[in-house]
Image (spheres, helix red, strand yellow):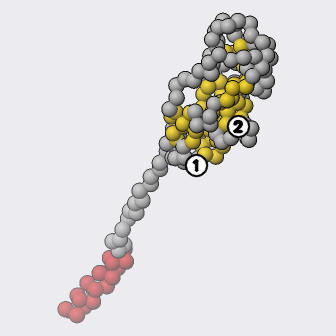
Amino acid sequence: MKKYLVSLLLALALVIGQAIPALAATDADITVTATPAYVAIADNATDYDFGIVATSTNYTTSTDLVAITNTSTVQTDITVSVTTNTWSGGVTWAHSETATAGVDTVGLVSNNSTFGVSDVIVKFAAPNNIYENCPAGISFSYGLKLVAPSSFGDGVQKSVIVRVSAAPG
């Protein structure tokens, strides 16, 4: 009888053991992280005065006039533009999208290297790249060239805002 009871308990343990799964890990975790692309630039200049200008004359700054500090964490395309299509003050100047002088029409060119080599026209409607595919964290400087009008409607000081913008590129 004892032998039969032990066999029965053993058989019962085998059946119960097969019905109850073995205990094992039921969860597996993974930590997922993501760092947002951070685009940020700053400059060291707030204004520049070409002074008194003569008709049909070009005035050029050094190419280190404005230093752009790039703290972006990703490659960027950096553009240069003006914020309006006219220069304010007295008889306004039209801003030329081709940097071509005319009657009360002025142009601007920028460069981050050497003027005359890879000059960038400063436009209003469609900004041009001054530094395309700028590596993350790489800073640079640029200068401006003023293409003065062929004639002036008055002698009042004129002004326009030049904007440098960065976007992931």
Point out which mark residue 115 bears: 2
Closer to viewer: mark 2 or mark 1: 2
| Tag 1: amino acid | Pro
**Which residue lies at the image location 67% right of the left edge and 29% below the top edge?**
60
Look at the numbered disc 1 and give the secondary structure of its residue.
loop
Q: Where does the C terminus fall, quadrant-wise? A: top right
The location of residue 156, given as percent across then percent down, is 64, 8
**Which residue lies at the image location 74% right of the left edge and 41% below the top edge?**
117
The location of residue 142, given as percent across then percent down, is 61, 36
**Which residue lies at the image location 68% right of the left edge and 17% below the top edge?**
53
Q: How crowded is the residue under tag 1: few (<14 C-alpha within 10 Å), some, or many (20+)?
A: some
Work out whether residue 75 can be spotted.
yes
Q: Quadrant of residue 114?
A: top right
Work out whether residue 125 can be spotted.
no
**Which residue lies at the image location 73% right of the left edge and 40% below the top edge?**
118
| N-term-proximal mark, 2 vs 1 | 2
The location of residue 132, given as percent across then percent down, is 66, 43
Above or below: residue 77 compared with residue 10: above
Residue pointed to by mark 1: 135
| Tag 2: amino acid | Phe
